[in-house]
Image (spheres, helix red, strand yellow):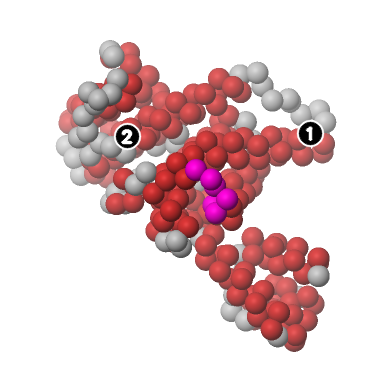
Amino acid sequence: MTLRDEERIGELLRVLPPAPMGWVQAAQELPAARRSLDEVVARAEADAEFRKALIADLEATLALEGYEPDRRVVDELKRRFSES
Amino acid sequence: MTGPMSQLSTLSDGELVQRCRSGDAEAWNELVERFSRYVYAVATRGFRLSEEDAEDVFQEVFTRVFTHLDTLRNDAALRPWIAQLTRRLCLDSIARKNREQPASEPVSEALTADLDEIDEAFTVREALTTLSEPCQEILDRFFARDQSYRTISNELDLPSGTIASRIARCLSKLRVELEGRRSPPAGSRE
């Protein structure tokens, strides 16, 4: 390898800039979001009133119960409740 | 690459997958960190998706990886799996857009070359992780983050006159590492 190779290595390092920090954080929070989703679903299955409230106004009920309004959790819950 | 290097960064992909499966949150963070640049580059530089579409693809890739990690037959095949998944989701995104806006530009013929270059770049990044943390930091800042000598000097508290020579030294070490990978077992690790 020569200096030209080192130039090429430099060019290749430039090809992979960091992804936006917010995207990375959101992806890293997936396990927590999944746990939150499982918890809400389990509770909705066990508590008819909670389930009714979720179906009536998902976001408001989640917020009222102290759940983080993660978009993926909300979307997944909407999908699940619309199927049921 | 802004804080201390994670100890998990030395794990192989297979080891990382196993730890993610066991519910290790730090391992998941490392997996996302390890592949985030790659997924981002494929979506934005390779397929030239808009930021909005690229973000959707990015999140969908990691959501699928997280939910289907148990179905991965060969743990060491994480990289090709993520690569294939990312490409497929990018193509789905383009197909959806084309249905909405039929006039939009088709996927360029240069795509394959771009994706090959991104794959090559990922291999270089893997080699980078074997260098010392100061080398990783300075090369990442200068090349990937496009920081000036002055910024690097200020943020790393290094004499500005030494930045260029440090970069050259670290680049040379990275070259040696890559040479070693091409002709094993002569490679040395710093």
Residue drawn at the location 74% of the way across and 77% of the way down: A54
B170 relative position to B101: left or right:
left
- Front disc: 1 or 2: 2
Residue B102 spot, x, y in % from top left = 82, 31
Instruction: Tell me if residue B73 is in the magenta stretch.
Output: yes
Q: Which residue is mark 2?
A: B128
Disc marking residue B185: none
Q: Give the position of the N terminus of chain B as an image quadrant.
A: top left
**Closest to the observer: B190 or B135?**
B190
Mark 2, chain letter?
A: B
Residue drawn at the location 78% of the way across and 81% of the way down: A52
A49 relative position to B117: left or right:
right
B174 relative position to A72: left or right:
left
Mark 1, chain letter?
A: B
User: Element type at marker 1?
Assistant: helix
Write down the region rendered in magenta: B69-74
Residue drawn at the location 55% of the way across and 20% of the way down: B113
Counting residues from the start of the chain, the first of labels 1 and 2 encountered is: 1
